[in-house]
Image (cartoon, rainbow, N blue to C red):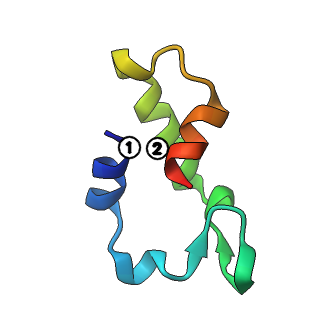
Amino acid sequence: MVKRLMAKLFKDELLKYFSYSGKKGKQKFSNLTTGSVIYDAIKTQEYFKYSTQNEIENIIK
């Protein structure tokens, strides 16, 4: 679910400039507003209802 959502929102060409925590000189994806929007959208799904933010972040990373 998470990867499908990310694929619909972003093109690989854009994401190549980001890493989750900004390593290797890339921009921080975790600082983007869309990161919290994705998290909130995922939490509305029954499967992820009780998932922690860390668990969801690990999927995104």
Give the residue drawn at x 46%, y 74%: 15
Placement of 2 over or under 31, stated as above or below: above
Give the residue drawn at x 61%, y 60%: 32
Return the residue nearer the eye: 28 or 23: 23
Q: Which mark is residue 2?
A: 1
Q: Point out residue 14 in the picture as x, y percentages from the top left corner.
A: 43, 79
Q: Are marks 1 and 2 in contact (CB under 8 Å)?
A: yes
Q: Which quadrant would the C terminus be assigned to in this image?
A: bottom right
Q: Which mark is residue 50?
A: none
Q: Point out residue 24 in the picture as x, y percentages from the top left corner.
A: 72, 82
Placement of 10 over or under 44, stated as above or below: below
Q: CA distance from mark 1 to mark 2?
A: 8 Å
Q: Residues within 10 Å of mark 1 (few under 14, many from 20)?
A: some
**SS class of the residue under badge 2?**
helix
Give the residue drawn at x 35%, y 67%: 10
Q: Which amino acid type is marked by label 2? A: Ile
Return the residue nearer the eye: 4 or 40: 4
Q: Residues within 10 Å of mark 2 (few under 14, many from 20)?
A: some
**SS class of the residue under badge 1?**
helix
Q: Point out residue 20 in the picture as x, y percentages from the top left corner.
A: 63, 62
Q: Which quadrant would the N terminus be assigned to in this image?
A: top left
Q: Which amino acid type is marked by label 1? A: Val
Q: Which residue is mark 2?
A: 38
